[in-house]
């Protein structure tokens, strides 16, 4: 589904170079649910942005669903985002002037889906997140948890094969967080590949695969038949540890 | 036009900025369309043919204080002397100078009063058989005055003229069937037979609404203060004007020669206030348009800065750059169209009020449409650059805290 080979991202400001990602390599298979953890400033969001085609990378190779991202134009990248990727943001990022129905409709309009088909999908997705009856409400009339469910509905409406969640429970209380996590698990069971960035260790543990980003590099915790394995790449050297 | 409904809903739910802009556009539309109409009306007037070869004509005033000469005889001597000057085409005594703002009007009617009949207010020039050529107006029917038809005296009713030459608009006003030549009109109950019709001959008040209903009356009433109108070769006119005072004083020195002005300068002086007003109006219109353009630009900038994260989110959800530009263009178009519609209605109402209050022509539809197109184009221009900048907002903004 997703393959990154030695992807680096360098931010350049005047005379200062910041290496946000260093030779980052990762493969995410179809149907996986991965939790990405790591300290603040470690490069989690940069990884998520590059994975979600929200910003370009400096070097390396990135393939998403068989498409080499490196040479795509801005329009091609936008279309790929729209067709293959669903986003769930920490701050929900709902458009305050649009009601729930219209918010969920946004990516579908960009895809040029006909009004009748849009209506069916929106109603299905709002139903799935339990907010069908509040389609005409504005985001500010909902609680944080409800807003995040709308954001999930918006991400699902385009039937993406790849779902990116950036701290999806970061602004929610524990009860709401659990509900959102259960929803993501259900979506994953239905076949979507999910990459979720989180600070919440408990939430991360619920994901079948955990990776940790430290200083722009990857530490990969994978559950194989109940036994976790650490595969870390540092300075192009692979370290394998067992029993973590 | 895929996005119209949600954009409309978004404007409806967050309407203060949009309503203020809409009102500004409506106000601009109503003022600018009327101002543009007035400016165009005035420019048309300034460019309109007066009937006179303005660059060939000049006039001056003679103020006589000597008592030892007959004013009428001296006028004849003066005219003859002027006509003999090299470069002069003709000269005539006239109680009024064309396009000068000073002259005479009278009501002329088809029947003598107190009988009721059709009548018209006419600006007239008392002149002689040289008037037609001196004024340079084009005779389209009939003939010029004969010398014996020109009356020199001061008793118009008792021993006045019997003929008149009128302008074509005079004919259209009093004889709608066009059959005016040979007809009689009454001027202070004195019957005057129409012997000639000229095409265009403006009155001394060219900006008035009935400035073309004019007549030449063959009557010379020489007074202490009188005007002489001279037509000369336009290349010689300046030279003749420079020497005319001396020539006149050489002929008779107990008088003062003043206001030696070319007819083009006379008209320029007459129009000076109007031209100043027009220029002020143009400045006002330009300022108003600039303020509106800045308003649109500012509101778009404000909307973009307010919606940076929203734009990033839209980009993250798959919006192409062109979709972001289109969003702002559609939003602007909606507000602009509503403003232009309200402004168009207001323009008609304002035009109607001005027509009734200041007796100006009624606002023409093409000025409303033209102004609307111009303001719309200006609004697109004002919004396109901020919109293009908005389109360059990175989708990664969606995941950042700003």
Image (spheres, helix red, strand yellow):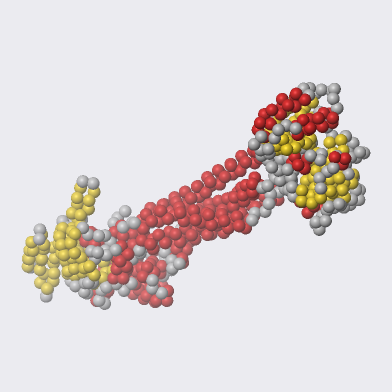
Q: Residue at x 34, y 74 (%)?
A: A128
Q: Is residue B21 above or below residue B264?
A: below
Taking depth in this image into account, of A189 and A176 the one nearest to the observer is A189
Where residue B354 appears, as percent x and y from the top left, is: 67, 49
Residue in the picture at 11% in, 75% down: A225
Q: Position of residue B144 (x, y in %)?
A: 81, 45
Give the quadrant of residue B133.
top right
In the picture, residue A20 is in which quadrant?
bottom left
Using the image, determine if residue B54 lies above or below residue A146: above
- Front-most of B258 and B303? B258
| Residue B385 appears in the rendering | yes
Seen at 41% across and 52% down, the residue is: B301
Residue occupying the far right of the picture: B158
Quadrant into which the N terminus of chain B falls: bottom left
Residue A189 lies in quadrant: bottom left
Image position of B222 (left or right of B30): right
Q: Where B99 falls versus A70 (above or below)?
A: above
Q: Which residue is located at x 47 percent, y 58 percent?
A: B332
Relative depth, front residue between B261 and B173: B261
Residue B47, given in percent of the width and then of the height, sits at 64, 46
Res A123 seen here: no
> Which is more toward the observer, B242 or B372?
B242
Q: Position of residue B278 (x, y in %)?
A: 61, 43
């Amino acid at each position: 589904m997703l393959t990154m080979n030695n992807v680096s991202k360098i931010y350049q400001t005047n005379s200062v170079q910041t290496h946000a990602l260093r030779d980052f390599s990762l493969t995410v298979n179809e149907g996986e649910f991965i939790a990405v953890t790591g300290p603040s400033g470690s490069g989690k969001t940069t990884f998520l942005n590059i994975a979600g085609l929200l910003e370009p990378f400096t070097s390396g190779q990135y393939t998403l669903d068989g498409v080499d991202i490196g040479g795509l134009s801005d329009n091609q990248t936008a279309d790929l985002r729209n067709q293959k990727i669903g986003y769930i943001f920490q701050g929900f990022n709902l458009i305050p002037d649009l009601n729930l129905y219209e918010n969920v409709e946004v990516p579908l309009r960009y895809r040029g889906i006909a009004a009748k088909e849009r209506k069916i999908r929106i109603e299905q997705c709002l139903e799935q997140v339990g907010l069908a009856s509040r389609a005409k409400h504005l985001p500010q009339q909902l609680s944080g948890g409800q807003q995040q469910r709308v954001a999930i509905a918006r991400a699902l409406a385009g039937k993406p094969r790849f779902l990116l969640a950036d701290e999806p429970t970061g602004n929610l209380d524990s009860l709401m967080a659990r509900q959102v996590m259960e929803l993501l698990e259900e979506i994953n069971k239905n076949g979507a590949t999910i990459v979720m960035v989180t600070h919440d260790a408990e939430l991360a543990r619920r994901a079948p695969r955990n990776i940790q980003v430290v200083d722009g590099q990857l530490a990969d915790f994978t559950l194989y038949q109940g036994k976790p394995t650490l595969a870390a790449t540092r300075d192009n050297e692979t370290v394998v540890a067992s029993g973590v | 036009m895929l996005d119209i409904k949600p954009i409309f809903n978004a404007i409806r739910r967050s309407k203060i900025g949009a309503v203020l802009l809409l009102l500004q556009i409506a106000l601009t539309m109503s003022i600018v369309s009327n101002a543009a109409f007035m400016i165009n009306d005035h420019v048309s007037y300034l460019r309109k043919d007066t009937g006179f070869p303005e660059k060939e004509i000049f006039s001056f005033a003679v103020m006589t204080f000597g008592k030892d000469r007959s004013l009428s005889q001296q006028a004849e001597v003066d005219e003859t002397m002027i006509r003999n000057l090299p470069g002069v085409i003709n000269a005539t005594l006239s109680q009024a100078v064309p396009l000068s703002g000073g002259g005479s009007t009278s009501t002329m009617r088809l029947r003598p009063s107190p009988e009721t009949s059709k009548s018209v207010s006419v600006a007239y020039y008392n002149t002689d058989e040289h008037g037609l050529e001196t004024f340079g107006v084009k005779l389209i029917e009939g003939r010029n005055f004969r010398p014996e038809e020109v009356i020199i005296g001061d008793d118009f009713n008792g021993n006045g003229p019997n003929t008149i030459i009128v302008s074509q608009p005079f004919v259209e006003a009093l004889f709608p069937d066009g059959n005016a030549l040979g007809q009689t009109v009454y001027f202070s109950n004195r019957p005057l037979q129409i012997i000639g019709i000229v095409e265009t001959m403006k009155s001394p008040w060219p900006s008035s609404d009935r400035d073309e209903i004019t007549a030449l009356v063959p009557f010379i009433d020489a007074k202490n203060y009188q005007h002489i109108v001279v037509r000369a070769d336009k290349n010689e006119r300046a030279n003749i004007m420079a020497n005319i005072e001396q020539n006149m004083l050489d002929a008779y020195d107990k008088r003062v020669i003043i206001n030696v002005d070319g007819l083009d300068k006379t008209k320029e002086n007459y129009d000076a206030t109007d031209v100043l007003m027009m220029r002020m109006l143009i400045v006002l219109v330009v300022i108003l348009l600039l303020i509106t353009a800045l308003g649109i630009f500012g509101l778009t900038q404000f909307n973009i800065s307010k919606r940076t994260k929203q734009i990033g989110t839209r980009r993250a959800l798959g919006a192409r750059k062109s979709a972001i530009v289109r969003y702002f263009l559609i939003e602007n178009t909606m507000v602009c169209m509503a403003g232009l519609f309200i402004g168009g209605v207001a323009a008609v109402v304002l035009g109607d009020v001005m027509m009734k209050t200041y007796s100006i022509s009624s606002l023409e539809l093409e000025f409303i449409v033209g102004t609307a197109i111009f303001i719309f184009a200006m609004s697109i221009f004002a919004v396109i650059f901020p919109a293009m900048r908005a389109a360059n907002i990175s989708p990664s903004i969606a995941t950042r805290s700003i």
